[in-house]
Image (tube, rainbow, N blue to C red):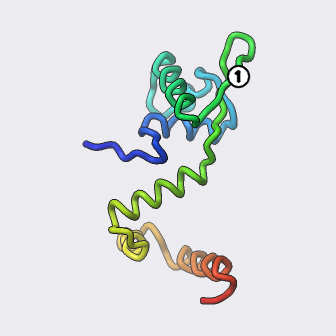
Amino acid sequence: MARLRQEGLTTREMELIQVLWQQKEATVEMIQAKLPNRLEGSTIRTLLQIMEDKGYVTHEKQGRANVYRPIIEQQRVQSSAMKHIIQKLFGGSTELLLARLVEDEEIDMDDVARLREKLKQHKGGTS
């Protein structure tokens, strides 16, 4: 099964960056404790090195431990992932994406009202 890549991040890398976004900074041990699926420390270190090479995280030595911080913003990754999903799964149609959310009951009328309000604000008050 093909893995969906978001902003150049693999599924495992996404798990690590999400922990870093939540914690702001973390050691390998801190990341390991927060992951839903257990990974060995050496695996986490390798993934973090790859992510650092890609420019997604940075680290600084504090005592004997490396403390990692995300460089890439969560919003940027989310936007990139949404664009990818809309293009690949919905043929570029946001309407089809929203229709799927409605059909799957992932969105309700309160959500629609909030979206409508956001659209009004985004478009300068015109609807």
Q: Is residue 47 found left or right of 74 in the rendered image?
A: left
Residue at mark 1: 60
Q: Amino acid at mark 1?
A: Glu
Q: Position of residue 73 (x, y in %)?
A: 63, 47
**Image point 56% across, 38% down: which residue?**
17
Q: Residue furthest left?
A: 1
Q: Residue furthest right?
A: 63
Against 115, residue 54 (above or below) is above
Provide the secondary structure element on which disc 1 rests. strand
Q: How many C-alpha atoms fall within 10 Å of the one at disc 1: few (<14), some, or many (≥20)?
A: few
| Quadrant of the snapshot with the C terminus | bottom right
Query: How many numbered marks appear?
Result: 1
Q: Is residue 123 found left or right of 96 in the rendered image?
A: right
Q: For residue 71, which quarter of the picture?
A: top right
Q: Position of residue 42 (x, y in %)?
A: 48, 16
**Image point 36% across, 70% down: which residue?**
100
Q: Nearer the viewer, residue 121 or 112?
A: 121
**Image point 45% across, 24% down: which residue?**
39
**Image point 47% across, 71% down: which residue?**
107
Q: For residue 123, which quarter of the picture?
A: bottom right
Against 118, residue 57 (above or below) is above
Q: Nearer the viewer, residue 116 or 61?
A: 61
